[in-house]
Amino acid sequence: MAGNETEWTRRIAAGDRRAYEEFVDSFGPRVHRLVRQQVPACDADDVTQEIFIDLFKGAAGFRGEAALSTWVYRIAMNHCIKRQRRRGDSAEDAAEDEIADDAPDPAKRAATREMRSEVRGAIQNLSAVQRDAVILHELHGMTYAQCAAVLDIPVGTVKSRLSNAFRALRESLHDYVQGDETDSLDSAAAQCGVAGGAV
């Protein structure tokens, strides 16, 4: 992103096509990845489009009181939650990304698929509030403060939800992880390509 965030959104609100294209290029992949983690694949493109329409309409109201990314993620999460409530879906219905079959060893490919499935399943089995915290903090790399701003909850609540989520994940993945729960989760996720938003 070039320049001040408030100036960037001001240009978008003024109809600056280049500013909007830069905005979509910057946030499009991250927003779409978040949406795919929250809603069924068949709806992901439509929800993402709705989010960016909302962001475009609301650009003039961005005052820089929070980071631009926090504002974007908050609006995106609200759209995902509304979509789930409207259709009665849960994140369990969200798309599962295909695993690339580029490993030379068929046994290794099978093991990777199994581990990835287990990690994804463990995350989906969390409560909705725990899952949202894990997705934002672990898969999108947000700080506690950023998660709190997006979810509109205190930082302490974010930490509590993550702690409970890690405990549940460690219990679910005890055959795959050992030692410190956060390091173990990161290791399991990294090995099966979940880290960084691949769930």
Image (cartoon, helix red, strand yellow):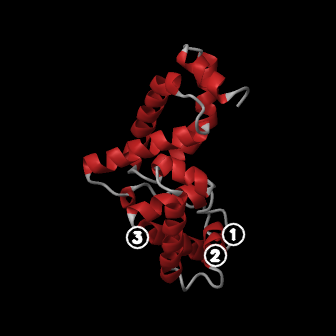
Which residue type does callout 2 highlight? Lys
* Residue 108, numbered circle: 2
Kindly identify the residue that appears in the image at 62 percent across and 32 percent down: 25
Q: CA gap, disc 3 to disc 2? A: 26 Å
Regarding mark 1 in the picture, which secondary structure is present there? loop
Regarding mark 2 in the picture, which secondary structure is present there? helix
Residue picked out by circle 3: 125
Percent position of residue 73, x then y: 52, 43
Percent position of residue 151, x then y: 47, 51
Tag 1 near tag 2, CB within 8 Å: yes
* One can see residue 44 in this view: yes
Which residue type does callout 3 highlight? Asn
Residue picked out by circle 1: 104
Disc 2 crowd, CA 10 A, few/some/many (<14, 14-19, 20+):
few
Q: CA gap, disc 1 to disc 2? A: 8 Å
Which residue type does callout 1 highlight? Pro
Kindly identify the residue that appears in the image at 64 percent across and 35 percent down: 26
